[in-house]
Amino acid sequence: MAERETPSAAVPVTPREPLRSRAWFGDGGKNGFIARHHLRAMGRGGHNFDGRPVIGICNTFSELTPCNGHLQILADAVKRGVLQAGGFPLEFPAMSLGEPFLRPTSMLYRNLAAMEIEEQIRANPIDAVVLLTGCDKTTPAALMGAASAGVPAIVLTGGPMLNGRFKGRHVGSGTDIWRMTEELRAGTITQEEFTEFESSLNRSAGHCMTMGTASTMACLAEALGMMLPGGSGLPAVDARRGTLAEETGARAVALAGSDLTPRRIMTRAAFENAVRINAAIGGSTNAVVHLLALAGRLGVPLELDDFDRLGAELPLLIDLMPSGRFLMEEFAYAGGLPALVNDLQDALHQDTVTVTGLSLTANCQGAQVYDREVIRAFINPVLPAGRGTAVVRGSLAPDGAVIKLSAAAPHLLDHTGPALVFDSIEDYLAVAEDSTLDVSAETVLIVRNTGPRGYPGMPEVGNLPLPKKLLDAGIRDMVRVSDARMSGTAFGTCVLHVAPEAAVGGPLAFVRTGDQVRLDVPGRRLDVLIDETEMDLRRSAWQPPKPPVTRGWTYLYTEHVTQADTGADLDFLVGATDSPPPRQAF
Ligand code: FES
């Protein structure tokens, strides 16, 4: 990737006339006057309104989202590209979602950000939009909003941080935090070492540099065709990201008013490519929820089982944490996603169209792999095919649950053990350090009421920390089951996204401590081994929990959020929603 020029301006597109923005600026009377003269107040002269395309730059910069803290620099570069290509750039802020700070969880706000971005695009004189994103939820939120708005869009992520460096070795976002936290709890490292590690991990601007959710969603935005080739991998501070930003701005001008809308690009075939690529990169389980939600916005028939079926066709080829050894910097220098796509082209649909006007595979034709340790050949995968995301169903998860096989212990993938059940994550954490806890390596640890509606917001707590008693015994993995998500940087034998969740009366609500639970990944089953009569008795005695909040966004969310197996979007946002420009109100 690094040595290739991007085909950003490779294919001309035919603008549809008139441009959308002419409904605001093209009027010679009062309404056009009002639209134009307020921009003149910002020093924008008449030549900006001569019919050139207006490019919105949707910026998720925020100091409360440190991963996106450098996006203003990229926004300036995008503007240069827009101006050089003859467009008129107008930057606007969008709700920013930062993993480190947002409570109870950033996922509670993904749909809110998507809704805000959709309405901003639709309500304003925008002919095409550049989506500046980075941290985990910002990319899916922006894609969802743009998909619903129906205006041509192109994604530019902020790029990953440089590798962390600690005591002479590379350390990765999240992955090494989980690892080091467990070592601190086990007493194998000191508090001083832990603090030194804290200051060594994040060495530059950018998002997490493991193949966590941010890197995964950047790769999948590129795989879907919504980003210029190579855009997902370049480090945030690599000067070539500035060039990429200029090219992105220029390409947005070419897209303006064309029919290369998100709906035309993100087809079923594009999603199938993205699901396969997600398997090959060892992508985050969060991608399942985000892609399902995004497909739902577009009316594309994507289902949970597609991730298992299509993903199982490809081996894990990228040796990146949390499933492997390296980090995004090495991936970029090894050739990045274009090199992987070039390797995979026979396994991918070749008739998609991307923001370049070419197909994904055409964009990447000839891209070379420069390091076969990082981007493996088919004959030497990190893991064989079928070790990506598996979907299990059964009496404990009738509508499905997911498990990331590349992050799980192989010996636990066919396991039966007694359940140890907690009604909340707080209940479990209150006893996790208790050395007298009745738990063994065979125990199946279950935490419920952590789903979309129950928590609310489906937090990343599914990789439950191991009980201290097991850590002290040298055990580093056990079967864990929840209706929560887990960080894309995390690992462990964690069954996630159980649907229906406990809070809406899924069977997870009825399992009790001591019940035998069977995880049978080869058979794609997750069952609680009690008979149907007993299950019916428990179901009839169940009382739904009271809504945690009765006003505001959280109330709207809990009333309308769908289950994880359909993407946890709001039910009234699902479906094809392209709509005409707003009416003029005066
Ligand atoms: Fe923002 Fe990881 S915390 S990408």
Image (spheres, rainbow, N blue to C red):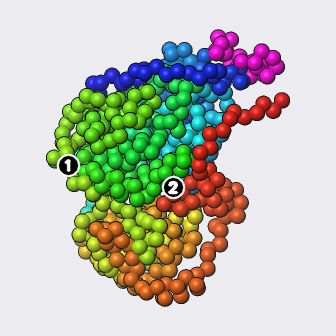
Instruction: Indicate left or right for 281 with 55 as reference.
Output: left
Q: Residues within 10 Å of mark 2 (few under 14, many from 20)?
A: many
Q: Is residue 463 magenta?
A: no
Give the magenta-colored segment's residue range.
Answer: 26-51
Instruction: Indicate left or right for 377 with 156 as reference.
Output: left
Q: Nearer the viewer, residue 361 or 190?
A: 361
**In the rendered image, the vertical position of residue 365 relative to residue 488, given as above or below:** above
> Residue at coordinates 51% horizontally, 69% vertically from top-left?
501
Q: Nearer the viewer, residue 487 or 563?
A: 563
Whether residue 42 is visible to the viewer of this picture, yes or no, is: yes
Residue 263 image position (x, y, % from top left): 53, 38
> Residue at coordinates 67% horizontally, 64% vertically from top-left?
549
Tag 2: amino acid: Gly
Residue 142 image position (x, y, % from top left): 54, 41
Disc assigned to residue 567? 2
> Residue at coordinates 33% horizontally, 30% vertically from top-left?
362
Residue 200 image position (x, y, % from top left): 33, 45
| Quarter the C terminus occupies | top right
Q: Is residue 41 magenta?
A: yes
Residue 560 image position (x, y, % from top left): 63, 59
Q: Secondary structure at mark 2?
A: loop
Q: Nearer the viewer, residue 449 or 569?
A: 569
**In the rendered image, the vertical position of residue 243 relative to residue 267, given as above or below:** above
> Residue at coordinates 52% horizontally, 21% vertically from top-left?
14
**In the rendered image, the vertical position of residue 478 relative to residue 2, given as above or below:** below
Instruction: Indicate left or right for 204 with 366 as reference.
Output: right
Q: Which residue was labeled with disc 1?
A: 381
- Given the current orientation, which residue lies at the most extreme left position? 379
